[in-house]
């Protein structure tokens, strides 16, 4: 969980810097008015959604992504986790950076769940004799990215505990956040 915490700290830093980088990029380097810049930002997001729908039958990274987070927590989205993580980071950064309204909380949950679940799967593959549950790492990753990207570590711990009502994850979440 300590290594997961370090990884999620880097993810949180990358997440916030990515959003700001795209904001600066669209504001300073893309000519045209607000609507044109937003249209250029959303075009790659639309292409991403089309490709995901064509290949997987689901959009996965559109909107808040709670259905995908639920799939990760129940163990149904294991083959795509790292791809979904990268695509959600890119989609959120393009969307917010090009001027759309939105928040950072739900994408942080998504990013933490997908990368935490992937981390758990890799650990399970490397150490098959240990009883590793990728869903526990997904929950822990959710708290870590929310805490790291918002700067509200205690709030993230409490919020994720309230979402899961699972006392067994409090210590891992606290260590990771």
Image (spheres, rainbow, N blue to C red):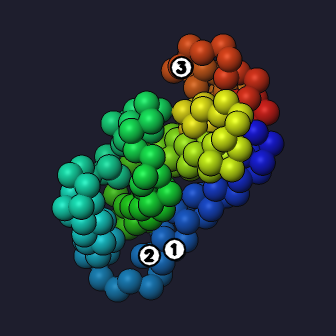
Question: Can you identify the residue that label 2 sits on?
Answer: 27
Dot 2: element: helix
Q: Looking at the rendering, which quadrant does residue 68 occupy?
A: top left
- Gap in angstroms between the C-alphas marked 3 and 1: 37 Å
Give residue 109's position: percent from left, percent from top.
51, 40
Separation of residues labelled 2 and 1 (CA atoms)? 5 Å
Q: Position of residue 141 (x, y in %)?
A: 62, 40
The N terminus - image quarter: top right
Pair 3/1: label in front: 3
Q: For mark 3, does the 10 Å Cα neighbourhood hold few (<14), some (14 to 19), or many (20 or more) residues? A: few
For image coordinates 30% across by 82% down, the residue present is: 32
Q: Which residue is mark 1?
A: 24
Q: Quadrant of residue 124?
A: top right
Bin the neighbour count of mark 1 within 10 Å (Cα to Cα): few under 14, some 14-19, many 20 and up. some
The answer to which of 80 and 149 lies nearer the viewer is 80
Q: Nearer the viewer, residue 112 or 76?
A: 76
Image spot of residue 101 (x, y percent): 36, 51
Residue drawn at (40%, 66%) of the image: 94
Residue at 67 percent across and 30 percent down: it is 131
Q: Secondary structure at mark 1?
A: helix
């Amino acid at each position: 969980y300590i290594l997961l915490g370090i990884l999620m700290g880097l993810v949180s830093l990358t997440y916030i810097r990515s959003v700001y980088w795209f904001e600066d990029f669209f504001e300073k380097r893309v000519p045209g008015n607000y609507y044109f810049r937003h249209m250029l930002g959303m075009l790659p997001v639309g292409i991403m959604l089309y490709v995901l729908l064509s290949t997987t039958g689901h959009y996965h990274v559109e909107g808040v992504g709670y259905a995908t987070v639920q799939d990760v927590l129940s163990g149904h989205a294991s083959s795509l986790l790292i791809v979904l993580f990268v695509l959600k980071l890119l989609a959120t950064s393009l969307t917010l950076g090009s001027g759309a309204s939105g928040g950072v909380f739900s994408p942080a949950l998504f990013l933490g769940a997908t990368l935490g679940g992937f981390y758990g799967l890799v650990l399970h593959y490397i150490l098959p004799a240990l009883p590793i549950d990728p869903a526990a790492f997904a929950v822990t990753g959710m708290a870590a990215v929310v805490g790291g990207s918002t700067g509200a570590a205690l709030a993230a711990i409490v919020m994720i505990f309230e979402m899961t009502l699972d006392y067994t994850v409090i210590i891992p979440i606290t260590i990771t956040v």
